[in-house]
Image: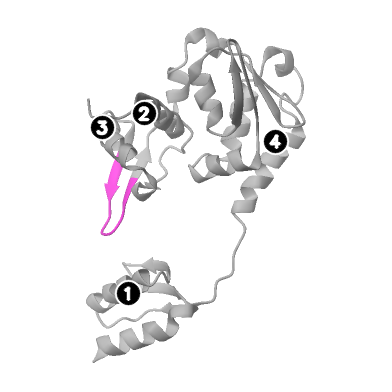
Amino acid sequence: EQGVDQADLIAFLLELSFHTPGEAYSLDTLTDDQTTMIKDLADLGLVKLQKGRKESWFIPTKLATNLSVSLTDSSSRKQGFVVVETNFRMYAYSSSKLHCEILRLFARVEYQLPNLIVGAITKESLYNAFENGITAEQIVTFLQQNAHPRVAEKIPSVPENVTDQIRLWETDLNRVEMTPAHFYDEFPSRDVFEAASDFARMHNGLLWEDAKKMRMVVKAEIYMLMREHLRGQNK
């Protein structure tokens, strides 16, 4: 009734099911349609909403993380359907559109036959999953728990080179980056601190702030601008 596309809603629900329960995710990462959905999902108990002074977050509940299981029929849960090969090719023996949408969250689906979904796990598809809050461990666990009976008895059920590479691609995104910066504290008042924080943010130079203790870290490239701004505030 609100004009939200059903496919987008289902895709968002499936995405939520891969999030970590109890962890806060920024509302700024959501699209306009997802922002509309999240309010109704909060009323249903799938997420909790938190509002801060400048930002807002949504926190998935256990109910949300169990959606991908509760939405599938009982017969599909009893038997696995996914086969992953050492060359990262993936074959899912299923006619379920839901299964197809779940796989799209972290893999490139190339084509779908009446009872077979063919795709591949790629670096790009995994990066999209990681950016949406899905972890490498969740993907590996999903593939292992839903392995086709022909491969489920093997040890491991998912090739080690695939699981290792999934984890390695995730660590690529978590590498430490060095950014020259300056640390500011001991602000004379909260008004001065908030004005400085807004100024740094406006110039895309705010790296970190602790509003409670009135401390912040700002990129070194805007040091001169910050100095002039703070001088003006002191006057």
Q: Nearer the viewer, residue 198 or 113?
A: 113
Residue for point 33% across, 31% down: 46
- Identify the image quadrant of residue 7: top left
The mark lying in front, picked from 4 and 1, is 1
Q: Which residue is mark 4?
A: 163
Residue type at numbered disc 4: Thr
Helix, strand or loop status at disc 2: helix
Residue type at numbered disc 1: Phe
Helix, strand or loop status at disc 3: helix
Q: Is residue 51 magenta?
A: yes
Residue for point 37% across, 82% down: 226
Q: Position of residue 14 (x, y in %)?
A: 45, 29
How far is the residue under mark 3 from the one under mark 1? 35 Å
Helix, strand or loop status at disc 4: helix
Q: For residue 199, which numbered disc appears in the image?
A: 1
Looking at the image, tell me whether mark 4 or mark 3 is earlier in sequence order: 3
Residue type at numbered disc 2: Leu
